[in-house]
Amino acid sequence: MDTSKSQSIPKQNMPQTDARPDPSLKAAARSGRLILGTQVLRLAVRVGGTVTLARLVGPTDYGIFGMAGTIYGLVYVFQDFGLATVTLRKPHLTEDDRNALFWMNLILGAALAVTVAASSIPVAAFFHEPVLRLLMPFMGTTFLVNGLHAQLRAQLARDHRFADLNRVEIGAFSASTAAAILVAWLGGGAWALATMVVVAEMAIAVGIWREQRWRPGPWPTDFQAWALLGSGASLSANDGLRYVQRNTDLFLIGKWLGAGPLGIYGRAAQFASLPVIYVADPLASLAISTLRHLAPSPAEARIFWRRIVNALAWITMPAAAVFASVPRELLGVLLGGRWTPGAGVLRGLAPGLALLPLQMACAWMFLAAGTRRRLLASSGLNAALVVAACFLLRNLGISAIAMGVGLASAAGALAGVAFICPADPATPSDAASALARPLGGAVVLGAALLAVVHACGVLGPVPRLCAGIAVGCAWMSVVWLIWPGARAEWREHLLLRGR
């Protein structure tokens, strides 16, 4: 691992490259377990912060922040122009590559910060919310801060220093949540939510610079950056399509229905997106890097791909069953009674969450293989289905829109399997076998929860939720005790024992 500063030896005479050992399948599994374990802690902090903020910040303020977030998030997609993934995929990085990537990220970050600030006035006019004129430039500062650490952070992931990355992110997440709660308690409203974004980015930057000993040098003389930018452009296009798929509903509801309904929809959608934020997305760097390094060994790459789909499915499918079965109890008890109108939204988005592992894992496989056309085609199909669902159901309310988005996302994930070709390490049958047991377990869990909620209908939401928790614990015990195939999969993920 090369973390030293640039040497004075002329680069044209002695090119510096990193010489990282390729991770084995077992090492990759250990890294994945570390990431997932850390995300449990982050998820606990997020849930605690969300529960507290939901009682301090009302739906309208959440809706205003959501309006800013739709534009901010679109710009966020292009914050590194795919250069972080270039860092992960490039077989060797010279010192010139590292320096150029750092300065390109910083310049791009400054440009995006200016773009967000400049767009604040037309966006405020579009949504008829004057506060966006100041809120968006404040949030836009994060792009400049991100430009300062994006390349250093990608190099830590490239070197598989996931323990260091997780430590930094947990600290930043905790600090930003505390800052947001303080601002909300002081009556900051939407500004509290924006504070969380800004403080998190600043804390991550400080932590990354402390962990990464490498320091950037000047822009390399006669360095041609077009090749790096060309690789990043297609990756950014894919991220843009994914953003359209994930956020079209929020943008259109904000325009069609206003801040209040958007706040209700957004809180429920945030619950549905927790497995994306804290499970799937954090595993992306590990998955892409490992699949690329295991490419010379298709058998190991196939095992790893199937394993990661199965591990994600054991998280997202039971979560989708819970969201579909007891959404009113979850929102009412955790966030408060004023958020229960989002129960239909949480239930409607559940199908897309259930098949999220398939969609994400296919994208990671295409990214690792460098098959950009198939990646863009798959992402484009998903985005088109979601946009069509939103427009078809726009007059039926937020619950109907959510159901359309959930079904469209699920259909897009299944259709994405058609883009797998014989040259890939995984096959459609691998996808089916990886999803089979988690799907069966989720169906049983959902049916049991619905039966309990129906039987406890005369009781209040707290007793019903407690009964649901008891059912969930019983379900886990039964799966472990009497289902050998499921138990073998769990042991494989938790104890790293391959079959």
Image (cartoon, helix red, strand yellow):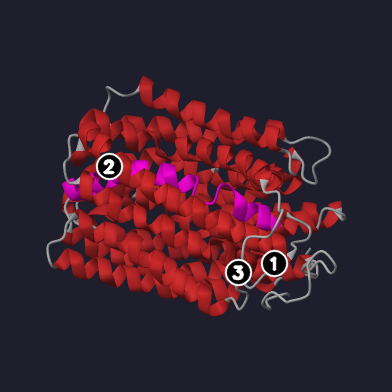
Crowd rating for badge 3 (residues with CA inside 10 Å; few <14, some 14–19, many 20+): some
Residue 343: percent from the left, percent from the top?
Answer: 28, 44
Residue located beneath label 2 in the image:
120
User: For residue 100, what is the image quadrant?
Assistant: bottom right
Instruction: Give yes or no for residue 87 being in the magenta stretch.
Output: yes
Name the quarter where the C terminus is drawn. bottom right
Residue located beneath label 3 in the image:
216
Mark number, residue 29: 1
Crowd rating for badge 1 (residues with CA inside 10 Å; few <14, some 14–19, many 20+): many
The CA span between labels 1 and 3 is: 32 Å
Residue 483: percent from the left, percent from the top?
Answer: 63, 59
Decide if residue 254 is on the left or right side of residue 477.
Answer: left
Residue drawn at (69%, 74%), measured in percent from left and top? 6
Residue 449: percent from the left, percent from the top?
Answer: 39, 51
Query: Is 149 in front, or is 114?
Result: 114
Instruction: Give yes or no for residue 133 being in the magenta stretch.
Output: no
